[in-house]
Amino acid sequence: MDYENATIAAWEQLKEWVTAEKFNPENEEEIQCFLYHGIVSFLGDARAVKPKPTSGKPEKLKFEDGKLVVGDMHFPDFSIGQGTDNEVVIEIKFARVAGIGNLFSGCKNDIQKMKRHHPNAKRFFVLFDQEPKYVFLSEHQFQDLRNIDPDCRILHFPADLNMSPRKEAARKAIEKMRENGIDFSEKGRKSAGIAVMGRKS
C-alpha cells in the first residue's frame, strides 16, 4: 500500500477544495476528517488508516480524576499502516489569527514527538492557516521546523510563507530580550495572575 502518496494526494485535494471555496475548515478535526476521506479514497481500503490510534501501549492506559493519563505514549493524529515498513504518521496543527499564543512551540513539540516515538515511519507535519491574509509561518520558522527533523515532510497552507519584515524584526527583538535574561514564561504567568485578580475585583 502506498501510504505516503495517499497522504500527499489527500493534502493536494484539500488545498484544491479550499482554493475553490468548496471547503472552509474551522478546526483541526475538520482537517483530519477531510484527510481521512482522501486517504481512504486513494487506498480503496480503510483498515490501515487509524485516526488518533490508541493501540501500541494499551497496558499503560489509565484514568486519574476522570482524565486519560498518557505518560510517555504518543497518539499522532494519524497512523497509517502501523507496524509495516511503509508506516506513515501525521500530526496536524490548525492556526487561528486570534490567540496564536504558543502555536510555534506546539509545532516543534509535535515534530519532536513524531521523531522520538516513530523513528522508522514516514513522518508528515500539517499546518493549516485559517486566515490566508495573515500567514503564521515564516521562512525562518519553516527552517527551524525542518532542522528538528529533516526527514519529516512539512505540508503547509497557504503555500506562501510570511515574508513580512515586521515579523522578522519581532523575532530578532524577542531573541535579543531572551539573551538579556527576560523570562517570557514568568511574564506570562504574572500577566495571567493580574487578569484573574482583575476579574475577581
Image: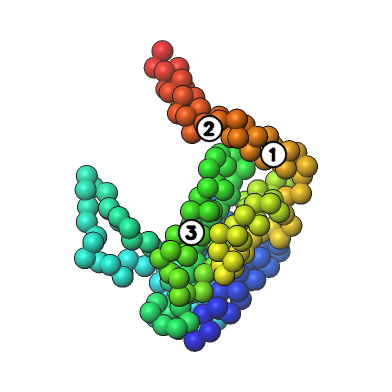
Q: Secondary structure at mark 2?
A: helix
The numbered mark, 2 or 3, whose residue comes first in the sequence reads: 3
Q: Which residue is mark 2?
A: 184
The residue under the point 44% across, 60% down is: 113
For marks 2 and 1, give the CA distance: 15 Å
Amino acid carrying label 3: it is Gln
Q: At which x and y percent is residue 142?
A: 65, 56
Foreground of the two, 53 or 183:
183
Q: Residues within 10 Å of mark 3 (few under 14, many from 20)?
A: some
**Label 2: how many residues lie within 10 Å, few (<14), some (14-19) or many (20+)?**
few
User: Which image quarter is the C terminus in?
Assistant: top left
Of mark 3 and mark 1, the one earlier in the sequence is 3
Res 191 visible: yes
The amino acid on which the numbered mark 2 sits, given as a three-letter code, is Phe
Q: Residue furthest bottom?
A: 1
Residue 134 shown left or right of residue 52 in the figure: right
Q: Position of residue 24 (x, y in %)?
A: 61, 57
Outermost residue on the top side: it is 201
Label 1 element class:
helix
Mark positioned earlier in the residue sequence (2 or 1)? 1
Where is residue 175? Give x, y as percent: 63, 38
Q: Mark 1 belongs to which amino acid?
A: Lys
Mark 3: secondary structure: helix
Q: Is residue 166 left or right of residue 53?
A: right
- Mark 1 lies on residue: 172
| Label annotation for residue 112 | 3
